[in-house]
């Protein structure tokens, strides 16, 4: 995405996005976004100027009228799988845009 990674070496990489083909209204579904990179070999600068392993994140733009489900409606298995992953709407004005991460890339490396 241009907002989060416009100047990053990952900006030009193709990604793999998995979503259901159809979703009924008021239905909870999972979106999986994979960014192919060798996170344990890549480094990024951190606040003190040193280098640390690379983080990753994603911005998903969903159709108008869509918004994140409240956390209390998520199935327990999905909550457990997403534990430690930060995700939120981009803004109150644009609830259909979701920001996920950053997370340590090596944690989610496939």
Image (cartoon, rainbow, N blue to C red):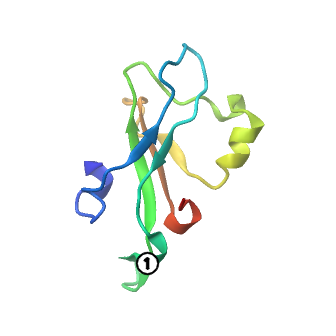
Q: Which residue is mark 1?
A: 41
Q: Is residue 21 above or below residue 1?
A: above
Q: Is residue 57 above or below residue 30?
A: below
Q: Is residue 36 above or below residue 38?
A: above
- The front one of 95 and 77 is 77
Image-quadrant location for residue 56: bottom left
Rendering coords of residue 83 (x, y %): 67, 51
Rendering coords of residue 41 (x, y %): 43, 78
Task: Please give the count of numbered marks on the rendered protein.
Answer: 1
Q: Residue visible at 64% across and 55% down?
A: 84
**Residue found farthest to the bottom:** 50
Q: Quadrant of the C terminus?
A: bottom right
**Residue found farthest to the top:** 25
Q: Residues within 10 Å of mark 1 (few under 14, many from 20)?
A: few
Q: Residue visible at 69% across and 40% down?
A: 78
Rendering coords of residue 48 (x, y %): 41, 83
Q: Residue visible at 38% across and 23% down?
A: 63
Q: Secondary structure at mark 1?
A: helix
Rendering coords of residue 8 (x, y %): 27, 64
């Amino acid at each position: 995405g241009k907002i989060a990674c416009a100047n990053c070496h990952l900006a030009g990489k193709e990604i793999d996005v998995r979503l259901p083909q159809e979703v009924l209204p008021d239905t909870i579904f999972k979106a999986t976004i994979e960014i192919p990179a060798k996170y344990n070999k890549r480094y990024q600068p951190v606040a003190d100027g040193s280098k640390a392993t690379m983080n990753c994140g994603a911005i998903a733009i969903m159709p108008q009228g869509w918004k994140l489900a409240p956390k209390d409606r998520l199935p327990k298995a999905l909550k457990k799988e997403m534990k430690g992953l930060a995700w939120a709407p981009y803004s109150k004005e644009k609830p259909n845009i979701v920001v996920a991460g950053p997370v340590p890339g090596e944690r989610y490396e496939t």
